[in-house]
């Protein structure tokens, strides 16, 4: 019944869907030049030969998918990979990093006509879905065409799991139709089994396999000259509601470390002006990267409001706070700074990367703070305890580098399905 109602709503609710797309475009969350891709319309031709469709919803999944795509194309060079994402940020990140043989499109919204149009055009031979992007119409239409589906890095948060349990019959029709689910751990595997999945394997967390981000040496040298010998820390991918805690941390520690500098990289660069106003309201001096403002001795906050440059700031600092973890976003991937010898700490809300967070805490590769108020205390401890900072950064780097075995394992699990493509 729930599945039927969902299909009716997505079929008849076209005016609402179009309004949502219009609003998202106005807010800068959709590319107006590619909005038709969300309707299943594309300007690109389907290449000849076998095509694997890989869907990765946003930035974290896209970065993990890059390593997997490179591995699969090396092992099976006669295939083309189509990767779809649902966010503008992930599309921009992928733009200059896609391996040869990979095409990017925005994923169609889960309306029957739009999904059908997408599948008719691209006609994939195999579908790979990252993590928890389970769109009912999409999955059922793929299944009706007898195209095998593999879920990679499969995971369900406690909230999502509870919702699927509530819609048990719909869950069984969805998960029971999936060829293979590669879960991140045994607990996740059990959840999918309860929801009706037929074939489940445990493969580990693919996000650990993400390669070290490429660096821009010239930009690093330029900024390092501006920073000099100052103590500097990074708040990576902040969301609304977190910047004040970061700014207050700078304000507090500035009284103890006179040369303190805070770098804020907002998850959404368009938030730069509100962060600037917030910092100035706290009597702090601010410089903004997109305005070509340099870091001066008096600069307290440097707002790095660009996309695709996070590696620059990981390279510049030894202390990285993983944002999205003080607000109910779920926390971002701490593996990225782990490659850069950074002492990593994050807040209590790490649901999207909970397994990685728990593992890093267990092996002393990261610190978890409990509240906004503990942010300055933790950072001060790291600044004053060089041995602790080195221990965290060394353990984090080793943890990240060991992720290659997970990539190999998942690739081997997928390979038989690629070999068997008809």
Image (spheres, grey):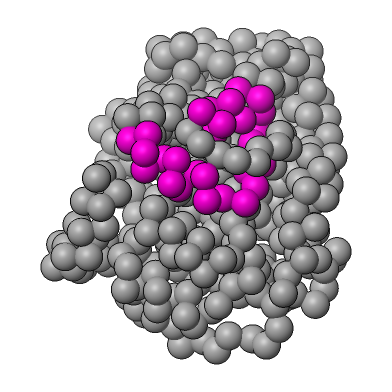
Whether residue 175 appears in magenta in the rendering, the answer is yes
Residue sitting at x 51%, y 10%? 377
Residue 172 position in % (x across, y down) = 45, 40
Q: In this rendering, would 268 be left or right of 256?
A: left
Residue at horizontal 35 percent and vertical 78 percent from the top: 36
Taking depth in this image into account, of 177 and 37 the one nearest to the observer is 177
Q: Quadrant of residue 18?
A: bottom left
In this picture, is 175 found above or below 278? below
In front here: 414 or 390?
414
Specify whether 16 is left or right of 10.
left
* Magenta residues (range): 167-194
Q: Nearer the viewer, residue 185 or 92?
A: 185
Q: Main secondary structure of the magenta part?
A: helix
Name the quarter where the N terminus is drawn: top left
The image position of residue 163, as x and y in percent, is 34, 32
| 240, 73: nearer the viewer | 73
Quarter-of-image position of residue 336: top right
Q: Is residue 170 left or right of residue 26?
A: right
The reply to whether residue 271 is visible in this rendering is yes
Residue 352 counted in the magenta span: no
Quadrant the C terminus occupies: bottom right
Q: x%, y% of residue 322?
A: 54, 31
The x, y position of residue 58, in whole percent, is: 49, 52
Residue 235 seen anywhere in this rendered image of the structure: no
Q: Is residue 124 above or below residue 222?
A: below
């Amino acid at each position: 019944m729930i599945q039927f109602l969902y299909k009716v709503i997505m079929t008849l609710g076209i005016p609402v869907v179009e309004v949502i797309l219009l609003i998202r475009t106005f807010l800068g969350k959709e590319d107006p030049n590619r909005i038709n891709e969300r309707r299943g319309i594309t300007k690109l031709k389907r290449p000849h030969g076998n095509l694997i469709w890989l869907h990765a919803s946003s930035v974290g999944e896209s970065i993990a998918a890059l390593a997997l795509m490179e591995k699969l194309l090396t092992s099976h060079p006669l295939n083309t990979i189509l990767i779809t994402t649902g966010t503008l940020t992930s599309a921009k990140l992928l733009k200059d990093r896609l391996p040869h043989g990979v095409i990017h499109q925005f994923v169609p919204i889960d309306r029957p006509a739009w999904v059908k149009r997408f599948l008719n055009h691209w006609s994939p031979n195999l579908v790979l879905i990252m993590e928890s992007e389970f769109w009912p119409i999409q999955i059922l239409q793929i299944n009706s065409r007898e195209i095998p589906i593999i879920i990679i890095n499969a995971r369900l948060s406690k909230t999502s799991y509870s919702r699927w349990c509530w819609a048990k019959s719909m869950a069984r029709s969805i998960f029971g139709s999936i060829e293979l689910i590669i879960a991140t751990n045994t607990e996740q595997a059990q959840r999918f089994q309860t929801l009706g999945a037929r074939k489940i394997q445990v493969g580990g967390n693919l996000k650990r396999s993400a390669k070290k981000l490429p660096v821009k040496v010239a930009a690093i040298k330029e900024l390092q000259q501006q920073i000099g010998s100052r103590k500097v820390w990074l708040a990576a991918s902040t969301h609304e509601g977190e910047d004040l805690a970061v700014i207050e941390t700078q304000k507090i520690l500035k009284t103890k470390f006179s040369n303190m500098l805070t770098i804020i990289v907002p998850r959404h660069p368009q938030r730069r002006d509100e962060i600037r106003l917030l910092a100035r309201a706290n009597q702090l001096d601010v410089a903004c990267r997109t305005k070509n403002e340099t870091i001066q001795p008096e600069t307290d906050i440097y707002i790095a409001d660009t996309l695709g440059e996070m590696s620059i700031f990981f390279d510049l600092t030894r202390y990285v706070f993983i944002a999205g973890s003080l607000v109910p976003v779920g926390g971002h991937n701490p593996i990225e700074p782990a490659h850069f010898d950074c002492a990593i700490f994050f807040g209590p809300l790490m649901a999207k990367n909970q397994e990685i967070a728990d593992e890093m805490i267990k092996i002393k590769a990261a610190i978890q703070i409990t509240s906004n108020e503990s942010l300055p205390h933790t950072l001060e401890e790291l600044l004053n305890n060089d041995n602790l900072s080195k221990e965290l950064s060394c353990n984090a780097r080793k943890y990240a580098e060991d992720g290659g075995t997970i990539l190999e394992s998942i690739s081997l699990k997928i390979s038989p399905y690629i070999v068997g493509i008809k």
